[in-house]
Image (cartoon, rainbow, N blue to C red):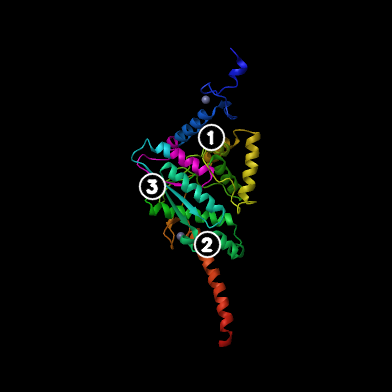
Amino acid sequence: MDLSRLAQLCDSCGEAPPVYRQVYSGVSLCGDCFKESIEKRVRRTISRYSLLRENDRILVAVSGGKDSLSLLKILAKIERDFPRASLVAVSIDEGIPGYRDEALQLAADFCRRLGVEHRVYSFEELFGVGLNDAIGKGLLSKLGMGACTVCGVWRRKALSVAARSLKATVVATAHTLDDIVQTYLMDVLRGEFPKAAIGLRREANGIIPRVAPLRQILEEEVVLYAYLNRIPFQETPCPNAKGSQRDIVRSFLAQFEAKYPGSLFTALRVIESKIEPRSGQLLPCEICGEPSSRNICRACEFERAFSDLLSLSGELVGADVSVDDV
Ligand SMILES: [Zn+2]
Ligand SMILES: [Zn+2]
């Protein structure tokens, strides 16, 4: 037997040359076996954590990036086995001209290709102002808030609004293992231990549950999956995210995982084993009615702060005009 040749073939089918070596398991896979292994792992994650039910109406949050388009492709495949389940893809237009327009086009085209209904909800129509407009008018800097903070809170709210209006029973997001560990680590660095596991189905208090079927897939595996499936995705990162806290944590964790494979899996397992089930009741927000741990949810709080600032600047103009009256 030619051993040198054997070592150059896929560990799973033994036929094709490998394209990826899973360092944490020591297995080398060819393109087809790699794609299959990712889809199998997503199915396993869904059943292990009971993320989806066979009659769910699943809203898939689709940004147009590699993660969300890969997730949509995998879920569209899985959904075929569950005739009572249905999919709807939703993109959020934050109002970041150029960057978001390209992504929305990619998302729309890909949904059409898969035969999945696609809807777009915008910050401007939901909250009265787009993100870059808010930045341009100096609203964020006056309130000392980062773009990613406002964007994250509003995106979350926008997805809830979309889910309610489309009668979705669950929201699937494309958070990968990397994303989730980043968020946990950011919580810790800000001085608090994560209060709830991300992307595990939790139904309570009128919340539409959120699930993350890619929670056990590495970012680099998603990139390769998208590439091997020839999924056209947006490669430019969000212009507002550069230098953000998440950006710093992301590059640190990616370097660490490259040097010590398996670290992200370990971190996820250890952190989630220590998360206490969230205590405290969620109540409907006094303004919008979405379940919140505060009287007024953060999304409404930002919306109100921005409109106060805008009307304040309007009043100042009015004050100039009315000087003659005094
Ligand atoms: Zn193979
Ligand atoms: Zn609210």
Asked whether mark 1 and ligand 1 are closer than 8 Å, the reply comes as: no
Density class for disc 3 (Cα within 10 Å; few <14, some 14-19, many ≥20) is: some
Are discs 1 and 2 less than 8 Å apart at CB?
no
Residues in magenta? 46-75
Q: Is residue 291 visible?
A: yes
Mark-to-mark CA distance, 1 and 2: 41 Å
Was residue 243 drawn as part of the magenta stretch in this picture? no
Mark-to-mark CA distance, 3 and 2: 27 Å
Residue 278 rendering spot, x and y as whole percentages: 48, 48
Up the image or down, 164 lies above or below 75; here it is below
Element at badge 1?
Answer: helix
For the image, the number of numbered tags is 3
Query: Which residue bears the numbered disc 2?
Result: 302
Lateral position of residue 60 relative to residue 218, left or right = left
Up the image or down, 203 lies above or below 286; here it is above
Q: Inspect the image, locate mark 3, and give the three-letter code of the amino acid beneath it.
A: Thr
Lateral position of residue 77 relative to residue 322, left or right = left
Are discs 3 and 2 less than 8 Å apart at CB?
no
